[in-house]
Structures are given as structure tokens and as C-alpha cells.
Amino acid sequence: MQNKLSFHQSSASLEIIGLPDYSNNENKDQISIISQWKLTIVDKPLIEGKIEHLGPIMDAFYIYSNLLIKNEIPIYNSKLIDIKADNLNVHNIVLKSSKPNVKPLVLKIGNSLLSDTINCFDQLNESPKVRIKKTDIPTKIPKKLRFGLNKKLKFFNFFIPPFIAICSLILFSSFFIYFYSPFENIEKKELINSD
Amino acid sequence: MTIWKLRNNNPLRKSYVTNNIKLNEFDALIRITVEMSKYLYPYIREILKSKEDIEENSVIWNDFNKRFIELIKERFNIESMKVKKLLNQAENDEIIIKSLLILSFCISNHGYQKLKNFLYDF
């Protein structure tokens, strides 16, 4: 009997199917030997593949998202997957099959679906129940930066406050949506029309 | 109160004080930002989505952008070139979208570390 674990984030969900490594005395609900994975994005074709494809696809998404926010050219190309930005809001993904004569799968996703997908991968990376070769995302401060932390702090004193301020204004502005209900407006318009 | 005072370290604000932010204050600001992003993720997502299909659903993006600009005019020094750039609607879309994306990528349990790394890499 195989174990199945799902990670959901809004319109994306990632399903991992596999077995625990009993030779390592693992719990029966653990997954260390992944046999199958499926990435479902609402209104898009199902993405699934072998375990050796999962790592490179996760890497591609992480590297691309890093390029996207660091003002670098957001293009990622590999044997398995290409991602490039059509514009600031739409991302073009080409998944290439390892089987011959199979056409590549082309997907266009927006920023909302991109962040849902990244968050599903984050959940998988952070799950204690799944043991995979962790994606090499920059979760630790590089040594070079750690040594130069004090010098960097002076720079941060200048840079961090504006960044935090912009973020807090964005977060503060987001609250504004609490007070907006498109359905109410539609109902009001309907009432006016019916009058 | 401390957070309130920390706001004044921002050189873009109308009332700006040159104090040095300590490492623990920097950490605290990042933690607050990450926790707020987790809480507001559904709204951040809707704003991003609204911008994606702006012809069909521009209301959320326009309301958000309008409020963002109102807050900047209210609190920031509008004579500064950087603030002018933030107020310029032709240029500010990219800054806003990238900031929203950074926030939306940092809502996991390790979001604090991710946001910190994004900032170190800037």
C-alpha cells in the first residue's frame, strides 16, 4: 500500500505518492521512495512525471522566480523545462517529454498561479513526512555575506526601511479589499435595474 | 511603540530620522512582514490575478493602486525622485508587482529566511 500526500495552495496542488524506507526504520506514513508525483493547476493540463523530473522542475521554478524578482532577465532553459516571461504578468512554461515523438506541453500561467505553485513546492520542501533530495534553494546566508554582515548592516539601514515601508503600504492597501465586495455591487446594480 | 519609531528611519518619509536599525529590529520587521503576508495571501493573490486579466477584472487592481498612491502621498516626501517614481503610474506597476511577488513567495514556514535572503541578494 502506497502513501499519498497532498500539498495545496489556492489553485495549485501537488500530490506525492510513494513508500517509506523501512530499511531506515521509518514510520509507515513517511515517504522516502517517491514513485509518482502530480502537479495540478486549475484550468491547466495535469503535470506528472518520474521522481527524477521533480527535482529539476522545482529547481526551475525556484531559479526562475528568483530571476523574476531580482530585476534580471527571467529566462530559464534546461533539457526538461523552459520558462520565460511573456510580460510582467504572464509566464510561458514549456515541459519537454523525455520520450521520443511526444510534443512538448506548453502552459501559460500568471503571477497568482506561479506563487501558488512555488508555495506548494515550499510545503513539500518543508514537510517532515517526505524525504527528497532537497532543492538547493538559498535558505542559508552565504558565508561571504555572513562575514560581511556588519558592513552590510549599514547598507541595510539605508535600504531596508524603504523596502519595509513599500511592503507595509502594500499590505495596508490590501486591507482595502476587505471593504470591497463585487457581489454587493452587482446586486445593487441589479436592484437599480429592476426598479 | 518601537515599530512606530522604526518607521521614521525610512528616508522616503516626510519626517525622516537617521537612526541605525539594529539587527534584532531588522529581524523583527522581517518577521512582521512575513506574518502579515501569510495572513493577507488570499488578497495579495487576488490583486496579482486582477492585474493579469486587467481588461476583465481591473477593479481590484485599480482600487489597490489608488489606495497605495494615496498612502504614499499622505506619508512620503513627494519631492524626492524615488517617491516620484513610485507615484508615476507608468513606472510603479513593476515595483508593485515585484513587491507583491516577493511577499507571496515568503508565506511558508521558512518564509522569514526566504525574505531575508531576498533582501541580502538585492
Image: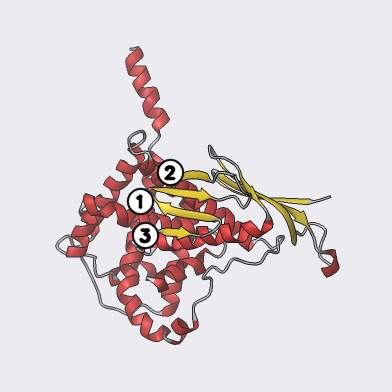
The amino acid marked with disc number 1 is Leu
Q: Nearer the viewer, residue A162 or A45?
A: A45
Q: Can I make out residue A62 in this image?
A: yes
When asked about the image quadrant of residue A184, the answer is: top left
Query: Considering the numbered disc 3 on the image, is that residue within a helix, a strand or a loop?
Result: helix
Amino acid, disc 2:
Glu
Give me the disc on residue A88: 1
Residue to which mark 3 is pinned: A167
Marks 2 and 1, how far apart at CA: 16 Å
Q: Residue at x 40, y 59 (%)?
A: A74
User: Crowding at label 1, few (<14), some or many (≥20) Cα neighbours within 10 Å?
Assistant: some
Contact between labelled residues 1 and 2, with CB atoms less than 8 Å apart: no
Residue B120 located left or right of residue A11: left
Distance CA(mark 3)–CA(mark 1):
19 Å
Element carrying mark 1: loop
Residue ID at (20%, 53%): B88
Mark whose residue sits in front, 3 or 2: 2
Question: Which mark is in front, 3 or 1?
Answer: 1
- What secondary structure is marked by label 2? helix
Kind of residue indicated by mark 3: Cys
**Which residue does the numbered mark 2 point to in the structure image?**
B46
State the residue at coordinates (37%, 57%): B98
